[in-house]
Image: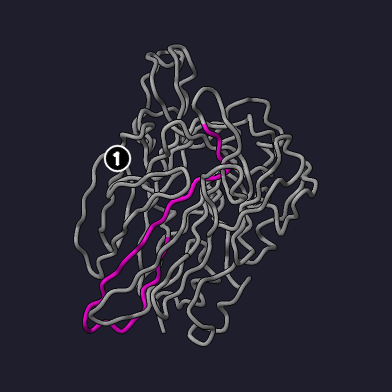
Amino acid sequence: MKKSKVLIPAMALLLFSTAASITGTVAWFTANRTFAMTAGEFAVINTKNNLACVLAGGVGTEATTTSITTKTNYILTDASFDHTETTHNIVIPNEDGDKIARIVALANADEGSENSGNHMFRQNGTGSQKIFSAFTWNLTFTVTFAAAETQDLGLFLDLSSANTYVHEKFEGKVGDDGTGVYTDAKCTAAATVDGSGKLTAAGTYYKVAPDDTGKAFRLALVPTNVSVESYGVTKVWAKNQTNAKSFFIDGGIVDAAVTTGSGTAYGTATTKATKPTADLVPAAETAGSGKVLMASGDASAIPADLGKTSTTALSDCSNYLGYFKNNPGDTATLTYTAVAWYEGTDENITTAVDTIYETVVVGMEFGTAKLNA
């Protein structure tokens, strides 16, 4: 991990959105049992089973009915996140980045003073800026089952959707290289360039993938409250990093040394699920039985209705988040805490020479599929 002076201005990171300001909005749509977050507007289309979502702010973030934004002058820097612990620990390095300063259970994480012991606050930045190790917020998904429904409903992050992305955002100047540069966060509208492929106007631009430090951006979804007999599983999204290069601090100890190359590969690690009681969940759905990491190149879609059981979805689908237990004529809910951070063990952080991380913008689309018994 690098020193915490390597950071990203939080105002440039609008979680779940495509704007770089706390005044930006997030649109979400329920189409084909889908909850989508993109830029521009907020709308609901009623569909079968009515997947809906309520957002709530957390550490470093604020929520309205339509958006999650970072707080004014809050800045995000590197840390690590241990999904293998039941407490889902956030591992925070010291100022020099060579030792673990503290380990905070996700449920206890706060943005208070240094005296709290559970704070995500790292240090003061320039002026009124405050630097944090991680940002969090909550998503509560709700479905309404038809009176004649007989199947559980699986929840998935649709990695195949154009609404699901982690793109780089930057300020371009006239004469900068315009290759692979777009004017919108979803990267659908190519920037105007001259005959030499150079930008013809200064402004805010986007790239499909970060060049270096942005590859270390991670987002975890941790189930923190589920309806009776429903089921949730922790997943980590490393959109712009490969499986082979995705690491984290596994079971670290305060004051233990953290050196370049430290970390455990996700492929060999277990995940902790949230479920009501063991007897209500298939035997295969135990720690370590499912895929945890959603890495670069993963374009997993929402499976067809009845195409998966919960067990096979867990083992086959990296984007499977759990299921809503069938509740005919009534509702079921799954609440997840999202954790956003820059992974300090990522090679692009441990070798970084810049003092500011690349900015990313995030879009996510969720959907459901009926599960086989």
Whole-percent x and y of residue 184? 35, 32
Q: Residue at x 40, y 13 (%)?
A: 194
Q: Residue at x 60, y 42 (%)?
A: 114
Nearest the eye: 117 or 307:
117
Specify the farthest residue to the front: 115
Q: In the rendered image of this protein, does residue 294 appear above or below residue 8?
A: below
Q: Residue at x 55, y 47 (%)?
A: 218
- Asked where in the image residue 145 lies, by quadrant, the reply is bottom left
Whole-percent x and y of residue 3? 69, 33
Whole-percent x and y of residue 373? 41, 84
Q: Residues within 10 Å of mark 1 (few under 14, many from 20)?
A: many
Which residues lie in the magenta part?
130-156
Task: Report the side of 343 relative to 301 (left or right).
Answer: right
Task: Report the side of 83 relative to 68 (left or right).
Answer: right
Q: In the rendered image of this protein, does residue 219 appear above or below residue 168?
A: below
Q: Main secondary structure of the magenta part?
A: strand
**Does the magenta run of residues contain 132?**
yes
Amino acid, disc 1 = Thr
Q: Residue at x 48, y 79 (%)?
A: 276
Nearest the eye: 351 or 77:
77
Q: Quadrant of the N terminus?
A: top right
Q: Which residue is mark 1?
A: 25
Task: Report the side of 254 relative to 315 (left or right).
Answer: right
Whole-percent x and y of residue 149? 27, 82
Specify the farthest residue to the left: 46
